[in-house]
Image (spheres, rainbow, N blue to C red):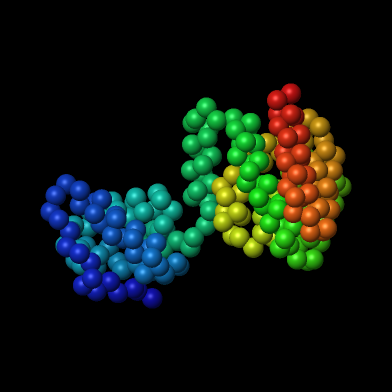
Amino acid sequence: MITEIGPSFPPVQKRLALVDQVLEQLRARILSKEFAPGGELPPEGGLAQMLGVSRTVIREAMRMLRAEGLVEVAQGRKPRVKPATAQFAVDTMVSLVKRSDGTLLDLIEVRLPLERAIAGLAAERATVEQMEQMAAAIHAQATALKLSEQIDADLRFHSLLAASTGNAVFGMFLGTLAELLRESFSRTNFKTGAERAVSGHRRVLEAIRRRDVFGAQQEMMSHLELAKLDLLD
């Protein structure tokens, strides 16, 4: 279904920043969900006429929106608003870290306050079903024969922990760090095996089962401090 824009667009000023102005207007309507996720945008010609700019300007603005992960453009099809995912943020975060002087030790420093808060809220809010899912992830990590399977289970435990807080933003933050977490887990598990991480996860879960907020926070801090020592070694 084509979304009608109508006359609500402010007129675009005739200057060199045409593309930026069009980009800003289209981005604002996407982020406000005026253009619904998964819905089609008006065709290139229609947008050009409505905004009083050339097709070339529209095409360039669409290219930039696509680079931002906001729209998807396929040959022979109308542009479509891309459903919201964390992948663009993940790719951007990984790229920035790799181009900076950041290390996996820096990642641990970020995780310490973040996952301490997650563990505490999980102790308050996790359901019995969520606790069982965490236990299953720990069991999968303990019995995995391949390093890749251990890492998958490790990531799943931390993801379930974040989900159990009931705050989706925690999951989003961890999602943007997923590739970096995978690299960190790969190094620590390869060096010490899964046993140390499994033991730490079990202690965190035991505190959550007791609804011990402070205990869950402390166990998570201890778990991450050990990971920090492994990386330092």
- Which quadrant: the N terminus? bottom left
Is 229 above or below relative to 132? above
Viewer-side residue, 226 vs 90: 226
Q: Residue at x 81, y 32 (%)?
A: 192
Residue furthest top as drawn? 233
What's the residue at 49%, 50% (across, down)?
88
Q: Is residue 161 visible?
A: no
Residue 165, above or below 5: above
Q: Position of residue 58 (x, y in %)?
A: 26, 57
- Position of 175 compared to 143: left or right? left
Question: In the picture provided, is 63 more to the left or to the right than 85?
Answer: left
Outermost residue toward the left?
14
Query: Is residue 82 something that shows in the picture?
Result: yes
Residue at point 87%, 47% (across, down): 143
Question: In the picture, residue 110 is in which quadrant?
Answer: top right
Toward the viewer: 8 or 52?
8
> Which one is in front, 32 or 42?
32
Q: Residue furthest front?
A: 214
Number of callouts in the render? 0
Residue at x 68% of width, y 47% of height: 116
Q: Quadrant of the C terminus?
A: top right
Q: Position of residue 24 (x, y in %)?
A: 29, 55
Q: Position of residue 50 (x, y in %)?
A: 20, 67
Image location of residue 122, percent across then percent down: 71, 57
- Residue 32, picture quadrant: bottom left
